[in-house]
Image (spheres, rainbow, N blue to C red):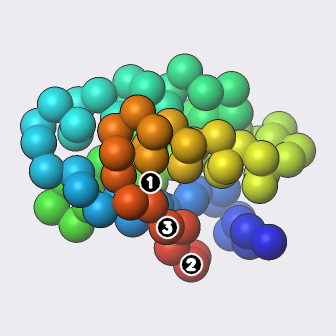
Amino acid sequence: MIQISGASWIKIRAVGMQCECCWEQTPVALRGVEGVELVRVDAGEEIVSVKLIQEVTDVEQLVERVLAILEQRFGFLCSVLSS
């Protein structure tokens, strides 16, 4: 089960984020996901931070959707980091 802290941010390690195209396209792809409010990418650390909207009821399903996009579209090896 995924635990979300008060600010509703999820941090994901996205191993394989090596090109500038990935840094730019990752936020664009994730902003289209219902329930995602904001996306930040720290390319140097290979971290994608996703802020969820307050009204998200099924956090686990949303996180699975985000991970699927990162893994299938971009080929990253992903893991959710603990808060």
Pointer 1 with pointer 2, Cβ within 8 A: no
Q: Quadrant of the N terminus?
A: bottom right
Indicate the amino acid at tag 2.
Ser
Q: Can you tell which quarter of the image residue 13 is in?
A: bottom left
Above or below, comparing residue 60 to residue 39 in the picture = below
Please name whichever residue, 39 or 81, is drawn nearer the observer in this view of the structure.
81
Residue located 14% across and 50% down the image = 18
Q: Give the Cα separation between the discs numbered 1 and 2.
A: 12 Å
Residue at the disc numbered 2: 82
* Residue 81: mark in rendering: none
Q: Give the Cα separation between the discs numbered 3 and 1.
A: 12 Å
- Counting from the top left corner in percent of width and height, residue 33 is at 61, 27
The answer to whether residue 22 is left or right of residue 32 is left
Residue at the disc numbered 3: 79
| SS under mark 3 | strand
Indicate the amino acid at tag 3.
Ser
Residue located 58% across and 34% down the image = 37
Q: Residue furthest bottom?
A: 82
Q: Quadrant of the C terminus?
A: bottom right
| SS under mark 2 | loop
Pointer 3 with pointer 1, Cβ within 8 A: no
* Residue 49: mark in rendering: 1
Q: Can you tell which quarter of the image residue 39 is in?
A: top left
Q: Give the Cα separation between the discs numbered 2 and 3.
A: 10 Å
